[in-house]
Image (spheres, grey):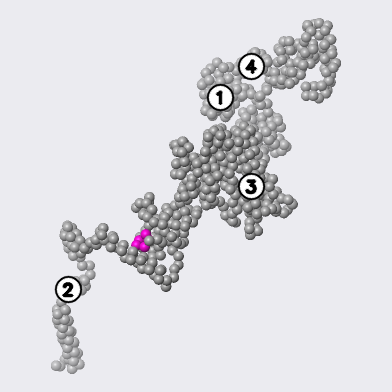
Amino acid sequence: MAYITSRQLSEVAGVTQRACKKALRAALNFGTPWREAHLSVRFCHGAKGGGRSGASYEVLLSSLPVDIQQAWKALQTRSKASSAPALRDDRPGLASYRLHLIQPALVHPPRSRERAAAVRTIAETTRIGPDGQPLPQSLSTKTVQRWIAAYEAQGVAGLMPRARRDKGERRVVISQAWFAKARAYLHSVAVARIDDELRAYVRSMHAAGETPGRILFRTGMKLRELSAAAGMPVDEMNKAVFSVPRVYVVNERLWRKIATRDRDAKAWHDLRPSMIRKLAERPTEFDIDAMHFDHTVRRPDGTVAYPKAIVAMCRATHRLFVVPFLLDQREGLRQQHVALFIEALLDQWGTPDRLTIDNGGEFGAVPDLSDLLQIVSQVHSANGRRPVIHAQPYNARAKVVENGIGVLQRVWLAGLPGHVGNNRINKKTQKVGRPTTPFPGSFDLFCDIVQMRVREYNAAPQRGKLKGRSPDEAYQAHIDAGFMIAKVDRASLMLAFSTRDEASVGKFGIKVNGQYWTCKELRYRSGEKIGVLKGRFHDWPLVPLFDLNDERTIIGYAEPNKEADGNDPANARKQKQGERSFNARPRELAKVARPADLIADTKESAAALPPAVEAPVSGIIVPNPQAGEIIAEMVKSPRERRSSQARKAQAEHKREVEKSAKFTRLLLGGKT
């Protein structure tokens, strides 16, 4: 089934490509006929020219009008005739083999007896084919003569076998078995539509990340569904008809990139374009990363553990510096371990002007060195560069140390006892079914052996960027060129790995790291807050103190406040001296600002304030009638209240007398 593009159709039909695209679009979307022919059109994605992203319209050649088909075939015939050498199967081995055979005959003139004798000799003595295997039958003189004639007419191209004229064109849709059945029941348009839908389904499964085996299984089921919907009697056919070849699924694996991007960030980032990184100009740029040993070592308590390490690599020489750590159970590398590693690294290799670190939480202490490294970078003439760089996640190529860790693990450490391999599930064991035997020795011995192997790594020649030199030789070359390291004293490192905080001064001093500290500068600051400088990963013997309003000035150094004997006269005098200092503090403050007269200040404030704002009263609301009586009683004086109570008592007594007289008259029958 041959398809041609809109551009090829425009060349044959004698119209513009734009008009052809419009006609093909209408035929695809609305079934509009073109020149009284119902076209079979498909929309293709890929680098075939045309619209956006290489998309284009293609039309089935057999669905075009007859005159267009004949014009296309005539154009193809002329094109093939003009490029006959291009229709040869370009297998240079076969052409070279034939040329080698006929070479003895070519030295003689055509139609001469010498050439005829050479041709007979070639045909009689040739027994081995171009693949080195014996020929199934001997060559004939006519075959040799035909090769000679083809070489003299067309050169080496004449010795090549002709290629199929339909080479590169798809002759079968989906599978040979299904295509044979589909042609008997379906129109070519329906066949092309099923192929497009099935191919889109395979691409969507690849894009979702489905396994190729299940895609192959589901594609067969999908092909059966599409065939039944198109009108094929699928129930009467063998299941093998709907078996999709594996190559049909494999050819669409390009769409798996979508699943890789969405589901495997590491693999997707490994596919990204990257620069070719060169060696650093000076051995003052280090990469730092964590490493997990593929070995087991026994702890002092007898339990088995996998040691960890922090590794640094010099970008200029590819030297390695390794510090192993044996951690407790369920413990990982922390910032404290990184700080210890940094101190050892700077003591051995000097101070770098740039550090590239991972984004792990254990490397959170490295940015504390930024100010220190910025000063060092000025010494190394590297102004304007960031001293600490955080590599992006899943970007192993940004850290050359990861490649060095891999080489160290695979080449230099894999042979040590206790090696389990990089697969924790499928460990290497001395005996099947039993755990791996740990390293035969203490962790200190393991560290010594690892350091020896690291020295071997640094002394071994390397290919690639080092060009056969070892890391030590590359480092020696920098030293010979005048390179010198710059070291930092321990006090500067302690200050770099410190933190500023504030503490409340109490009667026992300040409390830092669960311990009380005191000095004479704190005796009169009880109840105040003061700034403290403390180490993040080391316990300092003293705690520097600073004023919160001036962090650059150290005002004192606090010592541990230990328990003392209260009956000791020396301690009593010391306590008394502290009390005098505490009592003297208010007097010193009063010299700067005396207490204000709050009563006088209140009167002055009241006199300066404007009169209180009052709103006019529109009326008084009394919702309860008894409220007036209650309020009237409340505003009376005690004398008025007693007079009122006496009058009420007299009136009550009078009413009782009248009731008694009235009752008496009723008893006497109205007589008085």
Q: In this view, which residue lies farthest toward the front?
A: 570
- In the figure, 133 relative to 67: above or below? below
Residue 629 has which mark? none
Q: Amino acid at mark 2?
A: Val
What is the three-letter code of the residue carrying label 3?
Answer: Val
Residue 154, horizontal then vertical, whole percent? 71, 12
Q: Is residue 179 magenta?
A: no
For label 2, the residue is 635
Secondary structure under tag 2 reads: helix
User: Where residue 256 sits in the image (x, y, percent)?
Assistant: 60, 37
Q: Residue at x 82, y 14 (%)?
A: 122
Query: Foreground mark, 4 or 1?
Result: 1
Which stretch appears magenta?
A: 521-525
The amino acid type, in three-letter code, at marker 1 is Gly
According to the image, label 3 marks what residue? Answer: 450
Q: Quadrant of the N terminus?
A: top right
